[in-house]
Amino acid sequence: MRCDNGALWTLVSLALIGHSWGMADHQQVSEPVRFGVVTVSDRASAGVYEDRGGPAIREFLNTHVMTPHDYEARLVADERPDIEAALIELVDEHRCCLVVTTGGTGPAVRDITPEATEAVCERMLPGFGELMRSVSLQVVPTAILSRQTAGVRGGAVIINLPGKPSAIDDCLTAVMPAVPYCIDLIDGPRIDLGGGLEAFRPKGA
């Protein structure tokens, strides 16, 4: 088979273009996924005491999420407009596929994180709150006072957690195996777990 210089150059050019496209696709896939962490606390946001909930969430995710990831963190007061704005920003602007809040889930007058979460979500996932309360109830009887919930906004799952680091660990350990498949179902990136946790996915998923 003969090939003149013009045809040969065309073939080489197409090969190089295909290679560059392949590299671009690979780079896009290898970009870290982004998680949002929102600490809701009047006193922590005012500097009265140190935020312990946010770091506890990041420590847990660093231990158990094997997929490369980074974070966008926010520290806000117990003000519903501020919480809603932070959640919307993290999902819509920063494209976080998972946003985890800590604090503001009790029955006190200033505890309005669940209301803010419901306001920005398109559909709710009540099973998350039910399981987290069930797990926490094995530790403290006051777990029934928690109103934490979860929901979906766009391509992100938003999960409410309590403020105590040990409770954060208990709750995330319980629900995290279901999170990757939930993100799959809303067309988010693939998340793989480790560190003693395994993501549940139906066969063939």
Image: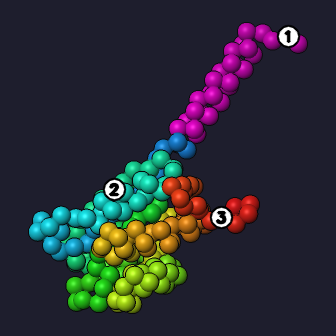
Residue under pointer 1: 2
Quarter location, residue 105: bottom left
Side of 199 where 12 appears, left or right: right
Which comes before the other along the chain, label 2 or label 1?
A: 1
139 relative to 82, above or below: below
Q: Is residue 128 above or below residue 93?
A: below
- In the image, what residue type sits under mark 2? Glu
Residue bearing mark 3: 201
Identify the secondary structure beneath mark 3. loop
Label placed on residue 72 = 2
Q: What stretch is highlighted in magenta?
A: 1-27
Please state which of the two labelled residues, at mark 2 or mark 3, is closer to the viewer.
Answer: 3
Dot 1: element? loop
User: Is there CB contact under 8 Å for labels 1 and 3?
Assistant: no
Q: Are marks 2 and 1 in contact (CB under 8 Å)?
A: no
Disc 2 residue crowd, few under 14, some 14–19, many 20+, Cα 10 Å: some
* Element on which disc 2 rests: strand
Nearer the N terminus, badge 1 or badge 3? 1
70 within the magenta span: no
Q: Nearer the viewer, residue 92 or 163?
A: 163
Q: In which quarter of the view is residue 163 placed?
A: bottom left
Q: How far apart are marks 2 and 3 (CA)?
A: 27 Å
Residue 85 visible in the picture: no
Q: Residue furthest front?
A: 139
